[in-house]
């Protein structure tokens, strides 16, 4: 019986569902079971997987706001941060805080849902907050904890490996 259950769970995971006691749940729903995520680029809807191509924030969660201008997103982030201190980390696609970025205020069990799976090359912790990056989905695998306004311009062997992130 145990062998059959393991094979069923393995097969379900290969099909893109997570087996639970209540039954199968699509990975997207299991990953972030909060309200449905959506993303907008300068007011126009975009695919969630394209979020990592732009300058974004999730301060309107479950809506992710993006812009083609880093200045627009940085200005918005500064105002929101000064008023609420909601973001806990900014992730960047390139080393030395370059390329596309996202100001993050939420936990993400599967960064692939928003296009950031295996794409983070540097980060800046914000507002004295702490968190942890993980190399696997659902906060598992090797981890990289960060604390208190840390700025990491290069991730060495962890470059482009993070698949989930969580405020701690």
Image (spheres, grey):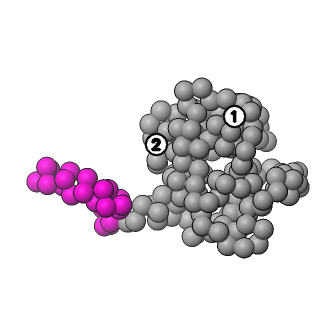
Q: In which quarter of the image is the C terminus?
A: top right
* Residue beneath the point at 78% across and 59% down: 68
Q: State the image quarter where residue 47 is shown.
A: bottom right
Q: Quickly name the residue at label 2.
A: 136
Residues rendered magenta in the picture: 1-24
Q: In this view, does 89 lie to the left or right of 22?
A: right
Between residue 137 and residue 107, name the one nearer to us. Answer: 137
**Nearest to N terminus: mark 2 or mark 1:** 1
* Structural crowding at the residue carrying mark 2, measured as other residues with C-alpha within 10 Å and reported as few (<14), some (14–19) or many (≥20): many
Q: What element carries label 2?
A: strand
- Where is residue 149 drawn, in percent x and y? 77, 34
| Identity of the residue drawn at 57% across and 60% down | 49
Position of the N terminus by quadrant: bottom left
Question: Which numbered disc covers residue 95?
Answer: 1
Rendered position, 101 above or below 145:
below
Furthest residue in direction bottom, as rendered: 44
């Amino acid at each position: 019986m145990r062998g059959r259950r393991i094979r069923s769970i393995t097969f379900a995971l290969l099909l893109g569902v997570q087996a639970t006691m209540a039954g199968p749940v699509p990975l997207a729903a299991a990953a972030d079971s909060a309200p449905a995520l959506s993303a907008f680029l300068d007011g126009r809807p975009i695919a969630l997987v394209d979020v990592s191509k732009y300058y974004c924030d999730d301060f309107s969660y479950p809506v992710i706001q993006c812009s083609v201008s880093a200045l627009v997103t940085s200005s918005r982030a500064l105002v929101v941060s000064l008023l609420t201190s909601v973001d806990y980390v900014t992730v960047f696609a390139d080393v030395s805080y370059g390329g596309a970025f996202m100001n993050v205020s939420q936990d993400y069990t599967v960064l692939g849902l928003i296009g950031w799976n295996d794409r983070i090359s540097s980060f800046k912790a914000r507002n004295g907050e702490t968190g942890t990056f993980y190399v696997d989905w659902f906060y598992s695998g090797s981890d990289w904890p960060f604390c208190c306004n840390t700025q990491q311009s290069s991730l060495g062997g962890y470059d482009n490996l993070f698949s989930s992130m969580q405020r701690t």
